[in-house]
Image (cartoon, helix red, strand yellow):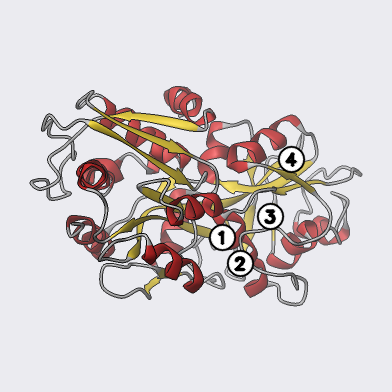
Amino acid sequence: MKNRYLPIAAAAAALTLTLAGCSDSGSDTGTGTGASGSGLSGSIKASGSSAQKNAMADWINAFQTANPDVTIDYQANGSGAGIQDFINDQVAFAGSDAALKPEEKTAADARCTGGEAINIPMVGGAIAVAYNLEGVDSLTLTPDVIAGIFDSSITKWNDPKIAELNPDAALPDAAIAQFHRSDESGTTANFVDYLAATAPGVWTYDLGKAWTAPGGQGSKGSDGVASSLSSTPNSIGYVELSFVLDGDLKAAMVDNGGGAVEATSANASTAIGAATVVGQGGDLALQLDPTIAEPGAYPIVLVTYEIVCTTGLPADQLDIVKPFLQYAASADGQGELEAIGYVPITGELLGKVQASVDSLA
């Protein structure tokens, strides 16, 4: 799998991803490739989530061959920065691993002339508790232990709380090098939401996109965390699963009470499938359940939303945004995701996503 996706990993290493491709935004229904070759030309910018960076690179690589006349630059600068770019009218759409907060939505709505900003879920993923620990190929952690590691109250790999969960592992008497995101991140927001919900006696820190717990070291972006882990022995961090598959990392199994569950796309899909839509109309914001203890459900997950105006984009931007998102939401676009460590949107929710994208005007 790793060799097959080396070109994608290379593309994802750059902050700016360039897409060439086009489609007729009025004729595509979101069920095909979304790249019908309409002769459209122009360029837009987009930014945000680094968790979806590898997915965006794959969509870009696929869409690029369809038509060379359209350029989309996606800057993976983090969910917080992407939302601000969208609010400030610097990008045509933004990616965020957390739905717009009320105060963000009010500001985002203001830039959508005659419309509103909506959250369209486009890709799901497992937030892997990734580690670099020589000689330990299997590691099981519980919410309390994960919280203890990331609030720096558990500082050694052979701590009795870790050893009790892993009696057969050769845990070293070594300090834990803990890495977290230094930038405002939707991955962080989902990760700390999980810890607060499942380990409330340990995790008592502020929630949101910014890391607020003591200790550890910050790295920028999902690729920055993955790179720090790869180069640092005895380290641990949290990162979207695709970055584990691209790197030389391992992911811990998580026991939420229903048994240890491996971080895989299929297991994360079980948890994401239990989410409920809490948005209204074309807004498809989801409520995840971090306390899920169903056997085989990997509980630490995220959904990346594309944040876009229902109406109000200039025509030259809409004519590019709409067909590109139709491609991403199509069977072809979603079909690319699982092989690179993501969770595709499926079933009834995918139908709603396609309808929401098709309604952009």
Q: Is residue 301 above or below residue 158?
A: below
* Residue 148 x, y percent position in the rendering: 79, 62
CB-based contact (under 8 Å), mark 2 and mark 3: no
Q: Which residue is mark 4?
A: 136
Q: Residues within 10 Å of mark 1 (few under 14, many from 20)?
A: many
Mark 2 or 3: in front is: 2
* Residue 310 x, y percent position in the rendering: 26, 61
Mark 1 or 3: in front is: 1
Check residue 24 in the rendering and tell me which mark sits there, or answer none: none
Q: Is 273 or 88 nearer to us in this picture?
A: 88
Q: Amino acid at mark 1?
A: Ile
331 vs 61, left or right, is: left
Q: Amino acid at mark 2?
A: Tyr
Q: In which quadrant of the rendered image does the C terminus lie? A: bottom left
The disc, 1 or 2, on the residue closer to the chain's N-terminal end is 2
CB-based contact (under 8 Å), mark 1 and mark 4: no
CA distance for labels 1 and 3: 14 Å
- Numbered disc total: 4
Q: Which residue is mark 2?
A: 194
Q: Which residue is mark 1?
A: 300
Identify the element where label 3 is drawn.
strand
Q: Which residue is mark 3?
A: 140
Can residue 263 be seen from the camera position used here?
no
Write down the quadrant of residue 232 in the picture: top right
Q: Amino acid at mark 3?
A: Thr
Q: Is 145 or 21 nearer to us in this picture?
A: 21
The disc, 1 or 3, on the residue closer to the chain's N-terminal end is 3
Q: Which residue does the image show at 78% across and 72% down from the upper left?
A: 202
